[in-house]
Amino acid sequence: MPYDSFREYVDALEKEGCLKWIDAEVDKEWEITSVARNYFRRVKEQERCALGFRNVKGYDIPVVLGAIGGSRKIYNLAIGAKKDFGSIKEIWANALENPIDPVEVDSGPCKDVILKGDEIDLHKFPIPTWTPGLDPAPFFTAPCLITKHAETGVGNIGTYRMEIKAKNETGVLWDLPSQHGAIHYASWEKINKPMPMAVVLGADPTIIMSSVSKVPQGVDEMAVCGGLRGKPVEVVKCETCDLMVPASAEIVLEGEVIPGERVIEGPFGEYTGYMGGPYKMPKFYVKCVTHRKKPIYHALFSQMPPSESSLMRQLPEEANIFQHLSGYLKIPGIKDIHLPEAGGSYTICWISLKKSFPGHVQQVMSAAWTHYPTFAKWIIVTDDDVDIRDPFVREWILSFRVEPIKDISFLKNTAPILLDPSSDPAEVPLWERRSSKVMIDATKNWEYPEIALPPKEDLDKVADQWDKYGLD
Ligand SMILES: Cc1cc2nc3c(=O)[nH]c(=O)nc-3n(C[C@H](O)[C@H](O)[C@H](O)COP(=O)(O)O)c2cc1C
Ligand SMILES: [Mn+2]
């Protein structure tokens, strides 16, 4: 069942036992991030909840994190999936193939409070500092940036973190010129006009799920949200520009990005587990803030994987690459795709394949990264008889199904993985960095010996009478 707002979804999480409210007073400058880090370290993924901090020192606005990618169970609730990969894959494929355009409504709760000019002060929101001592300021980590292409008018929603620079100014980080927000900004720079931009904080979960996913360029994520929800998103016009925002949003910032301007942005604790930046990036000037009477502040928990960000990118990306290879390119035999979280769910791509013709593996390895230029620097294809989600199995496969000289090939001068510190030293400007890709054929390339395990019947028989052996 689709949720109509972030708060309706937060209530649903609580009812399902997937949200813990924390009543102890916490300091947003150092404490929230360490509570989240401790929680992610101490609690197994299967048991993790979203965290709601409702007593943030100096604020009466609660901070909720982990609400999208705290665990697989949470992600499934957010997207309405019954189980993991299978149904997430179907829901995503359906949304991409059957997007539903938004419908305009006259007003909505996101307009309860409207602030302009001197009334604007971003510091009134409890925006946490994520890597205290190293981040120069608090950052928005769950902003959904809404823009339009200056020429085509096609819309985009993308999540790009934002540094709070002043009471009405933020940075914007487009990791690469191929990020869709950066492409839109370039189209406005070309005509030398400020780019109108709206930033949504706290919306029904399909908005943020689409915003962080690599939906093909030219497809408006707002319609993909409709496809994910199975009904259109209700949108309302901004106060100061003609962009449309979800009417039920918790907080909306309206403003513009000036052509030609670059300022220092970052550094920031990155999803790679390292600090990234500073970089030179454009600045966002906030001209109007609208919000609900008592807004909830939504954050995503990132930095060192595993984090909310690595899990919430893994699940849709696995589904979307499957759709890219099987659905769009009609490549047969793809069984499973796995993006380990240790690689930030971007760098390593495992694919299991029922190999059926010469060159099949090469086709899959080459096609996988065409999903988008920065995707995956390790692409490993193995057979469909193994579980690529088991880390031990993955090392066993690399050990005994790969002969390095024959089975490994390289592609040079590719776009780098976003913010990968190994691609180039920090002095090289972000958008000039290059990297390479490794493609590993980890399939059996001839008839292999039998697997050395006792016969399955014997193992099953022993399993059935396990008590007899007095072992736990
Ligand atoms: C928590 C989180 C933070 C992110 N921050 C950034 C960022 O600062 N810059 C960036 O270019 N991409 C960032 N991403 C990745 C983009 O959201 C992702 O590439 C998305 O596809 C961008 O939208 P687009 O495909 O419309 O360009 C982030 C993702 C997550 C989950
Ligand atoms: Mn996009």
Image (spheres, helix red, strand yellow):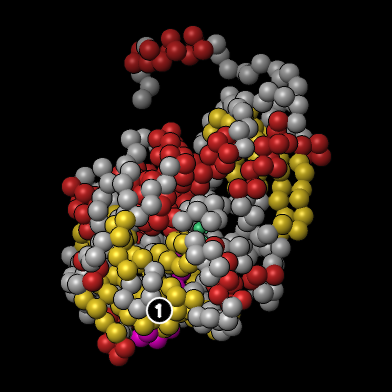
**Residue 163 among magenta residues:** yes
Classify residue 350 by image quadrant: top right
Residue 111 position in % (x across, y down)? 23, 71
Amino acid, disc 1: Gly
Residue 97 position (above or below residue 260): above
Residue 2 located left or right of residue 287: left
Residue at image coords 67%, 42%: 367
**In the image: residue 56, left or right of residue 435:** left
Q: In this rendering, is residue 314 above or below 108? A: above
Q: Position of residue 281 (x, y in %)?
A: 56, 78
**Position in image of residue 392 (x %, y %):** 56, 36
Tell me what residue is drawn at x 56 percent, y 14 percent: 454
Q: Does residue 430 appear in the picture of this structure?
A: yes
Residue 422 falls in which quadrant of the image? bottom right
- Can you see residue 64? no
Query: Which quadrant holds the N terminus?
Result: top left
Of 94 and 8, nearer the camera is 94
For label 1, the residue is 255
Magenta part of the protein: which range?
A: 159-168
Q: Is residue 62 above or below residue 324?
A: below
Image coords of residue 260 (percent x, y): 59, 83
Which residue occupies 51% across, 12% down? 456
